[in-house]
Amino acid sequence: MFVKVCGIKKIEEIEWAIELGFTAIGLVVYEKSKRFVDFYNSIKMFNFAKGKILTVAVSLYCKDVIKFKNYADFLQVYEKCNCKNLIFATENRPLDNNWKYLLYDKSKGDGIFREFPSWILNYRDRLIIAGGLNPDNVKKVIQKIKPFGVDVSSGVEIDGTKDFNLMKKFIKSVKRGEE
């Protein structure tokens, strides 16, 4: 299963993600986000992660992520973006299939868990579930939806900072959900 930890802000957090067996890390390159990582540090972290774990540049807008197309493995946005490895994030049924993966996120970054609409089941083979996931609810979501992947951010944080033990609990819950 594809398991992404988003909102990474430090090299140490990338090391944790690698050690714990996450598939990908996400760096938020949207300036208004509390998890924003500037261009210089994003490049530094993408280069550090290269070949060790998949990387995703994350923003609401294409203009923010497109400058990372040669550094990140995937670009994730909430709007149309003409690029090869697009993770299209939405809370609505997509109108086309011009994306590699569909990230369903009803929360749009607020970290509050919400139920899922039935239409997402049509996209399971390319569906990544996000929004309010944490070690306590991810197993149930995986068993119910059977998505391609899951994405966590605030669900593995304490006071806005990634926590190794919560990341470890999240991965364990994912594995239990796959059984």
Image: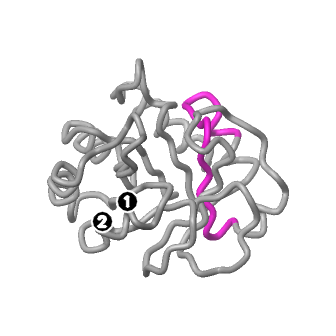
Sequence order check: which comes first, mark 2 or mark 1? 1
At a point 50% along the width and 41% down the height, the residue shown is 152
Q: Secondary structure at mark 1?
A: strand
**Count of numbered marks:** 2
Region in magenta = 124-140
To which quarter of the image does residue 58 belong? bottom left
Magenta-colored stretch includes residue 49: no
> Farthest right residue?
118
- Seen in the picture, residue 80 relative to 91 is either above or below; the reply is below
Q: Secondary structure at mark 2?
A: loop
Q: Position of residue 6 (x, y in %)?
A: 42, 45
To which quarter of the image does residue 7 belong? top left
Q: Position of residue 172 (x, y in %)?
A: 49, 36
> What's under tag 2, amino acid-wise?
Ala
Q: Which residue is mark 2?
A: 72
Dot 2 and dot 1 residues touching (CB under 8 Å): yes
Q: Which residue is mark 1?
A: 56
Crowding near pointer 1: few (<14 within 10 Å), some, many (20+)?
many
Q: Position of residue 161 (x, y in %)?
A: 35, 26
At a point 16% along the width and 53% down the height, the residue shown is 40
Q: Position of residue 117 (x, y in %)?
A: 82, 53
- Foreground of the two, 30 or 83: 30
- Seen in the picture, residue 147 relative to 109 is either above or below; the reply is below
At a point 50% along the width and 61% down the height, the residue shown is 77
Q: Marks 2 and 1, how far apart in space? A: 5 Å
> What's under tag 1, amino acid-wise?
Val
